Amino acid sequence: MFTRRKRGRIASWLVSGALAVTAVVGSLAPLAAAPVYAAPSMEDPPPPADDAGLREAAVKQAYQRLQGVEARTQGAIDKARTGADRVENLIDQAKARGRDTSALEAALASFRASMNSAQAKHDQGAAILARHAGFDDQGEVTDIQEAWGTVKGAGKEFRDAGKTMASALRALHAAIRDWRKANRDAMPEEPDWPTERE
């Protein structure tokens, strides 16, 4: 039988993954809610033409933030995929002991499909940033309307990727929790539990 600490390691890994996704999604929140002078809203048009300098600064700042968001989103997707491989290892250990893991296997397949969807959304956002319409190679605004479209389009893709990841992590966590409740004695004696540090 496991100690409480050993049983909680998979939950810790999933929580750390959820926190990484929350950080990615949360980093987009200032872009959507901050005042015009801090960062532009993704839903509204850019500030009026009489604030041209402020408008360009806000769009440039949003563009720079999105470059960081791109890297964090990819990091979260990579971490989630590594965790999925570890969950698969745990499923294999349980199957080797004759336990029914069909519910876990279905949840893991759904999780991986969601990660593929999140990766596709991330890649679309990265492609929008790479084209950098409205910006020059140094990130300076050359055309405010095109730059706004770049910021708005990339931000939406990264936000959608983060939401997809968060939803998938919650569903996988719930499936593991339910399986553990139903199979308290089914857990292997020496699991290869992922930890937060790994």
Image (cartoon, grey):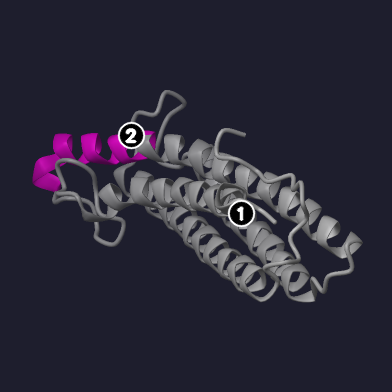
User: Circle 2 sits on which residue?
Assistant: 141
Callout 2: 10 Å neighbours few (<14), some, many (20+)?
Answer: many
**x%, y% of residue 33?**
22, 55
User: Residue 75 sits in which quadrant?
Assistant: top right
**x%, y% of residue 188?**
78, 55
Residue at image position (65%, 68%) is 180
User: Circle 1 sits on which residue?
Assistant: 7
Q: Looking at the picture, which amino acid does disc 1 mark? A: Arg
Q: Which residues are magenta?
A: 49-64
> Considering the numbered disc 1 on the image, is that residue within a helix, a strand or a loop?
helix
Left or right side of 117 for 100: right
Q: Looking at the picture, which amino acid does disc 2 mark? A: Val
Which numbered mark, 1 or 2, is in the foreground of this view? 1
- Depicted 189 relative to depicted 104: above or below: above
Residue 133 painted magenta? no
> Considering the numbered disc 2 on the image, is that residue within a helix, a strand or a loop?
loop
Q: CA distance from mark 1 to mark 2?
A: 52 Å
The first of marks 1 and 2 along the sequence is 1
Left or right side of 106 for 3: left
**x%, y% of residue 92?**
85, 57
Q: Nearer the viewer, residue 52 or 113?
A: 113
- Depicted 83 relative to depicted 65: above or below: below
Left or right side of 175 for 145: left
**x%, y% of residue 67?**
45, 36
Figure quadrant of the N terminus:
bottom right
Residue at image position (62%, 48%) is 6
Figure quadrant of the C terminus:
top right
Residue 62 painted magenta? yes
Farthest-out residue, left? 50
